[in-house]
Image (spheres, rainbow, N blue to C red):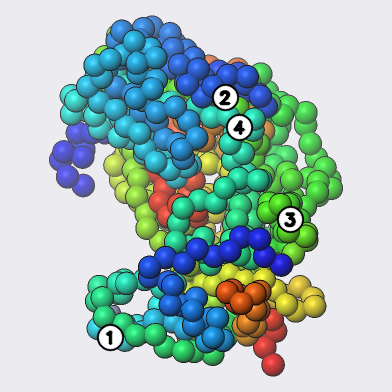
């Protein structure tokens, strides 16, 4: 289930390449050690441009979700659930994805990422209940 | 606050407002709509296009800029103009920047307008529309998350989870604003609705129903900004610009607290500039792209404690006869969607005492606000007062 393909920018291309290899990463600042998401060149805390990718378990908690009914994306079957997850590795970082729970999410519940291989060139990250 | 900022307080005024009819299909170009609204606002002020030396608008690539509207009205030597990129977040910043231009003498008479065919041409709600250009889109669009109603529904749910805000709270706001629209001849949706009607309206993106969402409208609206001194000599009672503020920064698309908006940071600066507080506001025209947008701003502008926006609305506080009448014209939910400028124009009507059946008796101070910063991480607002 996807119509819009992501269009990586020069800061994020490697993040997507790593997702395609089944790796979920955040950036760790070499200046102050802060982790961040999404991919950016500069650390907003110390403004350092030095950083490295850090693979983390794709884990977090449900911040919110919607059940989308209106056909905003032609060709995409409705309804579908989009979940907003607060990353365990980056407490200030929020990530969106489709829900793979077989039921509606619950506020605050622990979730883990599920890699969804769409085709040879594209892998997305969905979320489902942890454990 | 600096002395220079203090001098800005009440130095400029809105001297006229103008509208085109609000419809689902204007049958006209945005250039034509803009010209009509600009001329209507000038006529209201007792001025003509020959008096104009500044034009300003905001848009998202969907409408006629000042560089088209100026020449179309024979204005070939403007001394100031502004073509502000952005949606509802910047609607009030445009008027604020016009006020700055007027206060410094760079221009004397600026018309701020927004012309929009948001139903018949560029669907503002996102249905079938191209994606915005933002690096954050790549993390959302592949999951079918592309439209403002989805984004706002996500933040509304976060607020429900955190604070216990309910569908009935959202619904009460929609019902209240429709009751106001019933008293507004300009409003597109004037048939009263009940809470049951709200609850029975179809899902758009849960927790949002159809009646949580604003209209998509064709139309234009304009306001004339000039010095307070000059406005006193014109046809209409001047409405002073007591404060104008804009700013922000936190992107909710990738982080932060989704239950707090940029308005929380802006409000203290805005009130200090006006020398007023929320308790002084007689009427508030609050950006209502969705019901939740009003509830969170009632909190962030200090009308009730954080998390209590829902119960505040449910108490009837925002009704026409409540302590803080909100969106007296019906707002985007029921009057029409002209991207913030119709909220400013309604505030002016209220302060002039010309709002007819929906007039708030004795209204002296009005707050009008922009999109609080959820989609574009910035907001803007004005405090206006009767001269
Ligand atoms: Zn750093």
In which quadrant of the rendered image does the C terminus of chain B lie?
Answer: top left
Which residue in the protein does label 2 denote?
B219
Choose mark 2 or mark 3, whichever is in front.
3
Image quarter for residue B361?
top right
Which residue in the protein does label 4 denote?
B121
Choose mark 4 or mark 2, whichever is in front.
4
Instruction: Residue A82 in the image: state x and y as whole percent.
Output: 66, 67
Q: Is residue B194 above or below residue B167?
A: above
Instruction: Residue B88 in the image: state x and y as whole percent.
Output: 48, 42
Relative side of B159 to B237, left or right = right
Give the structural element (helix, strand or loop) at label 1.
loop
Q: Is residue B84 above or below residue B14?
A: below
Query: Which residue: 25% across, 32% down?
Result: B100
Check mark 1 vs ligand 1: CB closer than 8 Å? yes or no: yes
Q: How dense is the environment of label 2, judged by Cα within 10 Å: few (below 14), some, or many (20 and up)?
A: many
Choose mark 3 or mark 4, whichever is in front.
3
Query: Which residue: 37% across, 58% down?
Result: B249
Q: CA distance from mark 2 to mark 3?
A: 31 Å
Q: Earlier in the sequence, mark 4 or mark 2?
A: 4
Which residue in the protein does label 1 denote?
A30
Query: Which residue: 77% across, 52% down?
Result: B203
Q: CA distance from mark 3 to mark 4?
A: 21 Å
Check mark 4 vs ligand 1: CB closer than 8 Å? yes or no: no
Q: CA distance from mark 3 to mark 1?
A: 43 Å
Visible in this render: residue B372?
yes
Q: How dense is the environment of label 3, judged by Cα within 10 Å: few (below 14), some, or many (20 and up)?
A: few
Quadrant of the image where one finds ligand 1: bottom left
Query: Which residue: 38% across, 70% down?
Result: A11
Q: Which mark is residue A75?
A: 3
Q: Is residue B375 above or below residue A31?
A: above
């Amino acid at each position: 289930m996807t119509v819009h393909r992501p269009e990586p920018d020069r800061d994020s291309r490697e993040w997507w390449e790593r997702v395609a290899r089944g790796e979920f990463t955040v950036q760790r600042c070499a200046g102050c050690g802060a982790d961040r998401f999404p991919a950016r060149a500069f650390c907003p805390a110390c403004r350092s441009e030095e950083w490295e990718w850090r693979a983390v378990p794709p884990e977090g908690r449900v911040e919110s979700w919607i059940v989308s009914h209106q056909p905003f994306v032609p060709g995409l079957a409705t309804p579908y659930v989009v979940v907003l997850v607060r990353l365990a590795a980056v407490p200030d970082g929020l990530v969106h994805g489709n829900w793979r729970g077989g039921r509606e999410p619950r506020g605050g519940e622990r979730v883990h990422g599920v890699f969804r291989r769409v085709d040879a060139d594209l892998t997305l990250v969905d979320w489902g209940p942890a454990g | 606050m600096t002395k220079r900022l203090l001098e800005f307080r009440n130095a400029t005024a809105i001297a006229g407002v103008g509208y085109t009819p609000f419809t689902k299909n204007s049958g006209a170009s945005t250039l034509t709509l803009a010209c009509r609204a600009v001329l209507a606002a000038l006529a209201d002020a007792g001025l003509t296009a020959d008096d104009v030396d500044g034009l300003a608008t905001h848009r998202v690539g969907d409408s006629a800029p000042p560089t088209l509207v100026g020449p179309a009205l024979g204005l070939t030597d403007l001394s100031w103009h502004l073509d502000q990129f952005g949606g509802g977040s910047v609607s009030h910043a445009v008027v604020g920047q016009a006020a700055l231009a007027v206060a410094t003498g760079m221009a004397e008479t600026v018309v701020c307008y927004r012309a929009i065919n948001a139903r018949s041409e560029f669907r503002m709600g996102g249905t079938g529309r191209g994606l915005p250009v933002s690096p954050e889109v790549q993390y959302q669009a592949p999951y079918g998350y592309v439209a403002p109603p989805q984004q706002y529904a996500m933040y509304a749910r976060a607020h429900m989870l955190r604070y216990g805000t309910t569908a009935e709270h959202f619904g009460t706001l929609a019902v209240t604003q429709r009751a106001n629209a019933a008293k507004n001849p300009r409003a597109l949706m004037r048939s009263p609705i009940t809470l049951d009607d709200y609850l029975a309206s179809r899902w758009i993106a849960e927790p949002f129903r159809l009646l949580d969402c604003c209209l998509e409208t064709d139309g234009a609206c304009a306001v004339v900004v000039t010095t307070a001194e000059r406005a006193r000599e014109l046809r209409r009672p001047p409405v002073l610009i007591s404060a104008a503020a804009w700013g922000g920064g936190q992107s909710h698309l990738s982080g932060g607290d989704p239950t707090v908006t940029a308005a929380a940071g802006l409000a203290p600066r805005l009130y200090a500039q006006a020398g007023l507080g929320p308790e002084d506001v007689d009427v508030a025209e609050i950006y209502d792209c969705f019901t939740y947008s009003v509830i969170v701003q009632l909190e962030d502008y200090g009308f009730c404690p954080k998390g209590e926006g829902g119960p505040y609305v449910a108490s009837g506080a925002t009704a026409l006869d409540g302590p803080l009448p909100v969106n007296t014209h019906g707002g985007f939910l029921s009057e029409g969607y002209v991207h913030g400028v119709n909220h400013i124009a309604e505030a002016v009507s209220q302060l002039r005492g010309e709002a007819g059946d929906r007039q708030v008796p004795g209204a002296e101070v009005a707050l009008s606000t922009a999109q609080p910063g959820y989609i574009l991480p910035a907001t803007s607002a004005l405090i206006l007062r009767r001269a």
